[in-house]
Image (tube, rainbow, N blue to C red):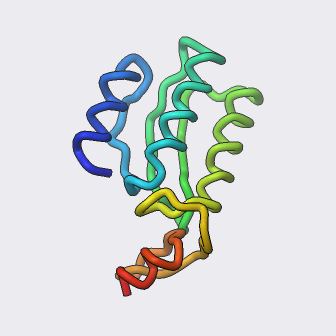
Amino acid sequence: MRKELADKLAAQYSEMLRCPVNVGDGWYSIVRKLLSALRKESSKVRVINIEQEFGGLQVYINPRTTKLDKIVQQYEDKSWKVCEYCGSAKEVRRHSVSGRRTVLCGDCAHDHK
């Protein structure tokens, strides 16, 4: 994620975000909405890792509860339908870029062959 987007998240969610955001710009909106939903549910939740793993968004939180886990799962599931690079939901599929699995739209997959 570009530094300016990561800095926005860090400033807006400083009390809960305890890690860098290691995903593409296209998932900025998903991550922002996830952090907002977690904050609404619990003032004590801390996000300890946000990354792309095996092509999808992976988020680790502490403490974990059933409700918080469901929120995280909901947004992780959304990542499989959105291009990690540009945020498009058109023609999204799994791809391998430089040996790393990710979810890309047709345009971004073509640009990153």
Q: Which of the pair 41/82 is nearer the observer?
A: 82
| On screen, residue 15 above or below 73 | above
Give left or right: position of 32 versus 9.
right
Give left or right: position of 4 versus 26.
left
Q: Which residue lies furthest to the bottom in this view?
A: 113
Give left or right: position of 88 versus 77.
left
Q: Quadrant of residue 9?
A: top left
Q: In which quarter of the image is residue 20?
A: top left
Quarter of the picture holding the C terminus: bottom left
- The structure residue drawn at horizontal position 55% and vertical position 34%, both measured from the top left corner, is 33
Q: Where is residue 101 in the image (x, y as percent from the top left)?
A: 49, 74
Q: Position of residue 111 (x, y in %)?
A: 36, 81
Q: In which quarter of the image is residue 3?
A: top left
Q: Where is residue 56 in the image (x, y as percent from the top left)?
A: 56, 60
Q: Residue furthest top?
A: 43
Q: How many marks can you see?
A: 0
Q: Position of residue 30 (x, y in %)?
A: 54, 43
- The structure residue drawn at horizontal position 53% and vertical position 72%, both measured from the top left corner, is 105
Q: Which of the pair 92/57 is nearer the observer?
A: 92
| On screen, residue 72 above or below 57 | above
- The structure residue drawn at horizontal position 32% and vertical position 29%, both measured from the top left corner, is 10
| On screen, residue 5 above or below 42 | below
- The structure residue drawn at horizontal position 47% and vertical position 81%, both measured from the top left corner, is 96
